[in-house]
């Protein structure tokens, strides 16, 4: 059968970290407009950002789904990974069904 490939996701994995607002220059660097809701996440858990072949990891917090937009693995230096996440649009929020927020 032909069609478009779709991302599939494994069972949710609990993780902890620090969630912070981001500065204006991050919006500009990622080419996002200021109406886009983004956060910076610091976590010991490795997370994969979007790429040409694979869909991004998803985070669920604040009752919303967030896509990993960029990931910087600082864990070898200080034990943490920095991830920039973008809030999913309302039509994409169905990914959260069955996940623990």
Image (cartoon, grey):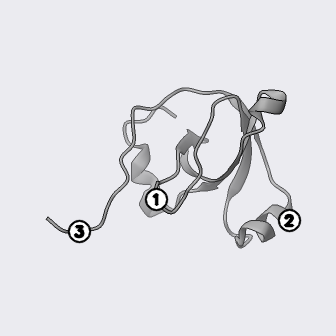
Q: Position of residue 5 (x, y in %)?
A: 31, 61
Q: Does any portion of residue 63 appear in the rendered image?
A: no
| Percent x, y of residue 19 | 74, 40
Residue drawn 71% across the image and 72% down it: 31
Residue positioned 46% across, 59% down in the render: 53
Q: Position of residue 88 (x, y in %)?
A: 53, 57
- Few, some or many residues within 10 Å of mark 2 (<14, 14–19, 20+): few
* Cα–Cα gap, marks 1 and 2: 27 Å
Circle nearer the N terminus (3, 1): 3
Total number of numbered labels?
3
Residue receiving disc 1: 53
Seen from the viewer's position, the closer of residues 66 and 46 is 46
1 relative to 15 in the view: left or right: left
Q: Of the residues tagged 3 and 1, which is closer to the observer?
A: 1
- Point out the tag, 1 or 2, that comes first from the N-terminus: 2
Going by the picture, which residue comes out furthest to the left? 1
Q: CA distance from mark 3 to mark 1?
A: 16 Å
Location of the N terminus by quadrant is bottom left
| Between marks 2 and 3 in the image, the one whose residue lies nearer the viewer | 3
Q: Residues within 10 Å of mark 3 (few under 14, many from 20)?
A: few
Q: Secondary structure at mark 2?
A: helix
- What is the x, y in percent for residue 97? 38, 42
Element under disc 3: loop
Badge 1 crowding class, 10 Å Cα cut-off, few under 14, some 14 to 19, many 20 or more, is: few
Q: Which residue is at 86% across, 58% downward?
A: 23
Mark positioned earlier in the residue sequence (2 or 3) = 3
The residue at which mark 3 appears reads as: 3
Q: Secondary structure at mark 1?
A: loop
In front of the other: label 1 or label 2? Answer: 1
Q: Is residue 51 above or below residue 100?
A: below
Q: Which residue is mark 2?
A: 25
């Amino acid at each position: 059968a032909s069609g478009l490939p779709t991302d599939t996701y494994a069972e949710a994995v609990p993780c902890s970290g620090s969630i912070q607002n981001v500065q204006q220059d991050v919006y500009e660097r990622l080419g996002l407009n200021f109406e886009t809701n983004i956060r910076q996440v610091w976590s010991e858990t490795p997370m994969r950002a979007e790429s040409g072949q694979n869909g991004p990891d998803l985070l669920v917090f604040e009752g919303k789904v967030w896509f990993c937009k960029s990931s910087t693995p600082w864990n070898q230096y200080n034990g943490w990974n920095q991830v920039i996440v973008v809030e999913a649009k309302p039509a994409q929020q169905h990914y959260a069904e069955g996940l623990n927020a």
